[in-house]
Amino acid sequence: MKNFKNYIYILAATAFFAACKPSIDTPNFNHGTADFTRYISVGNSLTSGYADGGLYLAGQQNSFPSMIATQMQAVGGGSFSQPLFSAAQSNGSGYIKLTGFDANGSPITAAVTTNLAYRDPTFFTKYTGNLENYGVPGIKLLHITLPYYGNLNPYFERLLPGVAPANTNTSYLSFITTKPFTFFTNWLGNNDALGYATGGGGGYTGADALTDKATFASLYNLLINSLTATGAKGACATIPDVTTIPYFTTVTPGLLLAGAQAAAQKAGVTPLPAAIYITASTNAAATTYGVRAATASDLVTLTFPTALLGKPTTDPVSGAVTNPYPYGLHPNNPIDSKYILDPNEVALVKDYVSSYNATIKSVAAAKGLAVFDAFTFLTNLKNNGLTVNGVNLTSGYISGGVFSLDGVHLTPRGYAIVANEFIKAINSQYSANVPQVNVANYNGVVFP
């Protein structure tokens, strides 16, 4: 009887554990109503994998389109070719790397100048293989119809069969639409605002102009009509607020003044500097400029050469003093406008970006395209941070993990996050279930 009872107990236990056996659900990955047979990516430096102030092989390999394409292959996506630099020329255009930190905790960087991919001082070694990633650093929406653009942009020239200055009849728009495709991502338009901002706005003659709003709308309609002309579906991204990127949020007037005062105090100089003086716009249109003390509302570019602060200005060739007043610390020698985006210029950029994004959303909606709202995403990242796989990320310079050393472009981890935001938008719009990228597989800024 005792043995019989044990037998019953064993059967009951077996049944219990069988009932408790976890079931493993196989993810129902599918392409929904989209066709990823040939996916192409259209855009600028962000699309190409540009990072750390340059385009190089490791950055290309971690581009967000490449990550998306890899995930698409789980649901019928085809191969995805990028214009990769060769191993022998893997450093491409060159870039900057982090080599350490100084006594104040400020990062020290160095330029990588070996194994570059130039065939002459201007142009790169040609790429002749298959191509699905059409990201071209520096390109604006304003450029996509220019038949001679291949002579102006070495990154585009590299992709064309012709050699500059013979490229006179291949626009970017015609180039990307030559071969059939079934799906696209499009992140063009950033440089139509970013070039003005990073150049310090309207007070510096070397800065780019903001693209006219009506022209932007006309070209964006032309672009999307061309991309969807044969029935392809796709996803578009909006343009971020330039004031959310570390390029404009890392160096501040307050930090510059504190550093100048500390240096003066250490040197026994009195009185201590009282203000940072800048060249800034004096009207809302940012068409007239004057000198004033900087405030916390003025944005200083990441490229501002802090070593010049407080020193007389000299001729870069002869070394002769051209202005004896301490640079940036006296109203007679203010910081150049090219290093400052003042509140009037900020307001102008925001107004244009708002208009551009309204166009992007409207055109995409009319065509039934997915939209990754990069403006909202990066604004939330700046304001609230982001936690992915237990890792806290912010828009902070270096420590934030998302932006690369140039303060504009992304780290591999940042590009992985962007890839997932695109995938979320694609899945939502096309009832698809493309698997997401494992962000943990990608690094932030590489420390020495």
Image (spheres, rainbow, N blue to C red):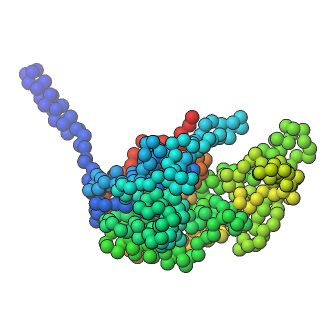
Which residue is at a point 18% across and 37% down the rendered structure image? 18
Indicate the quadrant containing the N terminus: top left, top right, bottom left or bottom right. top left
Expressed as whole percent of the image width and height from the top left, the position of residue 50 reads 51, 52
Which residue is at a point 53% across and 74% down the rendered structure image? 216
Whether 228 is drawn above or below 391: the answer is below
Expressed as whole percent of the image width and height from the top left, the position of residue 193 reads 59, 66
Which residue is at a point 33% across and 69% down the rendered structure image? 232
Expressed as whole percent of the image width and height from the top left, the position of residue 418 reads 46, 54
The residue at the far top in this view is 2
Which residue is at a point 16% across and 32% down the rendered structure image? 14
Side (left or right) of 276 relative to 105: right
Whether 409 is drawn above or below 207: the answer is above
Q: Nearer the viewer, residue 351 or 65?
A: 65
Whether 372 is drawn above or below 390: the answer is below
Side (left or right) of 44 relative to 438: right
Q: Is residue 238 visible?
A: no
Q: Nearer the viewer, residue 373 or 89?
A: 89
The residue at the far right in this view is 270
Please tell me how many numbered marks the rendered image carries.
0
Whether 229 is drawn above or below 343: the answer is below
Q: Is residue 107 visible?
A: yes
Expressed as whole percent of the image width and height from the top left, the position of residue 431 reads 31, 63
Side (left or right) of 229 relative to 1: right
Indicate the quadrant containing the C terminus: top left, top right, bottom left or bottom right. top right
Which quadrant of the structure image shows residue 108? top right
